[in-house]
Amino acid sequence: MTYPNDPLADGGIAVFAENLRAGRTTICKVTSAYLDRIESLDAKLGAFQYVAKEQAMAAAEAMDKLLASGTDLGPLMGVPIGIKDIYAVDQMPTTNGSLFDASGITGSEGRFVTGLKQAGCIILGKTKTVEFALGATGVNEARGTPWNPWDLKVHRTPGGSSSGSGVATAAGLCAFAMGSDTGGSVRIPACFNGIFGHKTSIGLLPTDGVFPLSPTLDTLGPLTRSAADAAIIHAIMTGGDIPAPAPLKGLRLGKPTSFFFDNLDPEVESCVELALQSLMDAGVEIVEVEIPDPNERDWVFPAIAPPEFLAAIGENDFHQALPNMDRVTGARAKKGLDITGMQHAAAIIRHNQLADLADDAFEGLDGWVSPTCTFLPMPVADLAEAGAAEKSAQASRNTQPGNIFKLCAITTPVHQFGSPLPVGLQVMCRRGFDTHALSIGLALETHFGPGAKPNLSPI
């Protein structure tokens, strides 16, 4: 089977923008190429829940005419993207990854998606998600589990909950895709698919028109092929300047003394340690740091997210949806029924206290570093086995503290240091320091060089 090359594979958004304005390509041509790639590859990968072919081509034609008339909307003009299927998009269905219709809870298109359109993005369709975005492996028994493109013979976990966004971006089915991150749902699929992910600070991007899993913890964020692309998206969608790479010399990164480096797969441990040593050789100072106990996530997160989800969907509708829900997602959500109002309030209070303690622990540091995920993407079939299922429950182990501590974070690939499957390095920064986190990500990307990409030729 033949299919077009990924139009943004070389140089990403910046080079596409340059080629477009120089007349070397058109928005219609690039959009059509991505739609052809989806048609050719997605039967295997299953990244998209809905493909908006006619809408995308109509939008592309309109954007080409607008540019030709002298109206330039900026660097994202004409960039074809995917949107996680917990976001509402006008004239596109919203499933929230479920067989139960909760589109009324998601509501109508929100400010962020409208902003992407106003910036000139072409929405190719909706990417698959874990049911109601409540899950970290990417598995969805209700609507289907996307296929991690790094192993076309064995169906491996794509990471969740923004599973389709991770797969679509890694496989070049779109220029980038939007996800959401309540406990790691941008960073985990970015890590497992060998791409870049940006978990934004709480409140940075508006979440109206996005299914409210947990208004206390929900954040939006892009999954991209590079830190450079993420930096452009951040600048355009927040109205700021495009971040520049931070100088490596003089950068001080804290390495937590406990928790984040425990129980790692050998390949993860090796790649992360080699990456950190490479940074130290380049002049980065990596110092041990004591941080608030991340184990508090074990009680804080379940006392916040599941009851807030149940409050959104309603107890009666939840019981109606439960028989057809993904079993793991349903079981996680059901625990919210046992959380009292006092327990939820106590968790919110502790959440705010932990955020203050975490802020103090950043004193004199540019960020904290850790592996993004503690293990490599595992075969989906193995999740039926007790040991593997227990391990898979730890997919959000290293990401969830970032939500509990109200941090922003990035993940960048480091599998180039010796793993056949993707490994991610996470950098966590203070809330509101997203520009700085992306500057660090740009510096790491420049230093490490490009990671390998999945080989899709067998499809």
Image (tube, rainbow, N blue to C red):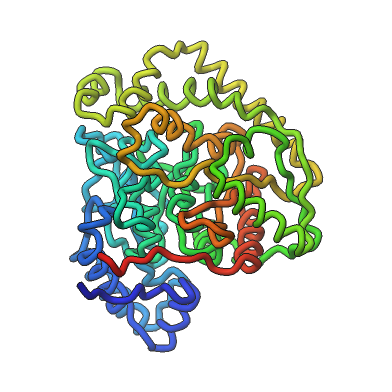
Looking at the image, which is closer to me, 245 or 1? Answer: 1
Q: Quick check: 22 left or right of 262?
A: left
Of 399 and 200, the residue lying toward us: 399
Q: Residue at x 21, y 47 (%)?
A: 93
Image x and y of residue 99, in percent: 20, 35
What is the quadrant of the C terminus in the image? bottom left
Determine the residue positioned at 40% across, 60% down.
170
Q: Is residue 436 left or right of residue 49?
A: right
122 above or below 276?
Answer: below
The answer to whether residue 231 is above or below residue 47 is below
Question: Which quadrant of the structure image shows residue 123?
Answer: bottom left
* Farthest front residue in view: 266
Q: Is residue 31 above or below residue 81?
A: below
Taking the image as drawn, is residue 185 in sight? yes
Q: Looking at the image, can residue 203 be seen?
A: no
What x and y, as percent, mark residue 430? Answer: 67, 43
Q: Quadrant of the N terminus?
A: bottom left
Where's residue 416, x and y in %?
Answer: 55, 62
On the image, the x and y values in percent for residue 148 come to 35, 52
Q: Residue at x 33, y 28 (%)?
A: 328
